[in-house]
Amino acid sequence: MSDVITLENVKIEREGGTTFIILNRPEKRNAMSPQLHLDMCEALDWAAEDDATKVVVITGAGGNFCAGQDLKLYFRGTEGDPKLRARARAAAHAWRWDKLSSFPKATIAMVHGYCFGGGFTPVIACDFAIAADDATFGLSEVNWGIIPGGLVAWAVTQVMNYRDAIYYSVTGDQFSGKEAAAMKFVNKSVPLEELRGATLALAEKLAAKSPAGVRYTKDAIRTVRNMSREQAFDYLNAKSDALKYVDPEGGRQKAMKQFLDEKSFKPGLGEFKREA
Ligand code: COA
């Protein structure tokens, strides 16, 4: 009996504390239909509350990450149906940015094969991204006469420098996983056969840390980018205070005791013993 939810266009798999949420339309290179967007919203809501899920990996079935929005079902298919278009757009935005970028657990995009257009947004919204060396990224919108809409143009400027953002958006040129790593669009790239192992190694490293510490740290890094120095100082002080009270593990107190009293760990070299 499976303890994961079943969805039409999204597959969920577990490996230890890592939950793979997999775009699952391999025959369409995981192009995103309205149903896939709705399924992704459901999958992320489920994973956020699922106690066994410590880290979420977003990836695609059949050797590709995602061929972008489904031109047939997302664009043409909603042209005469404003209600469906609005619902699809809201769901597309909700999971690819709002839900992922504020996800309460660490998230990793694992990119192999093709990643085009609207597929960029979830890669950027995840906390981490690891690609296969030979993955193919492309802002292909310009090739068929549209702009990188639906937040894509904004999202790429969060992680690409200005020259790269303009270059790849306007030329539509592809870049490889290796090039993506060199420009820091992803954290790193590895040979395809090592992709799952490298992703799981990162997931396991994250899962070993204090969940509250991981959550508050990633929230802090993301949020302060859009704040003034004064706002950031105040916000970070308030977050630090809040963390003391919301962390059910009492990590700070435990770690202090282990370092200062028991001398049983060194914060500079690894995490405190959470079970102690
Ligand atoms: N929207 C709708 N259908 C898509 C799609 C998309 N974005 N990407 C792929 N598909 C469909 C194809 O129409 C084809 O369907 P069919 O078997 O019913 O004919 C199927 O997926 C396989 O695609 P195909 O082009 O035959 O595979 P390929 O491996 O030779 O090429 C791509 C893969 C991704 C390079 C190519 O399909 C492509 O360029 N897709 C569009 C990518 C894009 O520009 N996305 C941005 C949208 S914002």
Image: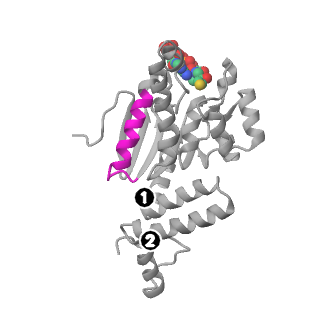
The answer to whether mark 2 and mark 1 are in CB contact below 8 A is no
Real-space Cα separation, disc 2 to disc 1, in angstroms:
20 Å
Q: Is residue 233 above or below residue 207?
A: below
Question: What is the quadrant of the N terminus in the image?
Answer: top left
Looking at the rendered structure, which numbered label has been put on residue 159? none
Q: Could you tell me which residue is drawn at 54 percent across and 50 percent down?
A: 127
Looking at the rendered structure, which numbered label has been put on residue 244? 2
Q: Which residue is mark 1?
A: 207
Image spot of residue 108 (x, y percent):
50, 47
- Tell me the quadrant of ligand 1: top right
**Residue 192 visible in rendering:** no
Residue reaching furthest right?
163
* Residues packed near mark 2 inside 10 Å, few (<14), some (14 to 19) or many (20 plus): some
Q: Could you tell me which residue is drawn at 66 percent across and 21 percent down?
A: 146
Q: Could you tell me which residue is drawn at 39 percent across and 32 percent down?
A: 39
Q: Could you tell me which residue is drawn at 52 percent across and 21 percent down?
A: 70
Q: Is residue 231 above or below residue 142?
A: below
**Residue 108 visible in rendering:** yes
Q: Quadrant of residue 246?
A: bottom left
Q: Is residue 132 above or below residue 143?
A: below
Q: Earlier in the sequence, mark 2 or mark 1?
A: 1
Disc 2 residue type (three-letter): Lys
Q: Quadrant of residue 113?
A: top right
**85 vs 157, nearest the viewer:** 85
Task: Count the numbered circles shown.
Answer: 2
Query: With 157 as the anchor, is 128 left or right in this view?
Result: left
Q: Is residue 13 magenta?
A: no
What span is colored magenta in the figure?
Answer: 36-54
Residue reaching furthest bottom?
261
Determine whether the residue tagged by mark 1 lies in a helix, strand or loop: helix
Determine whether the residue tagged by mark 2 lies in a helix, strand or loop: helix
Main SS, magenta residues = helix
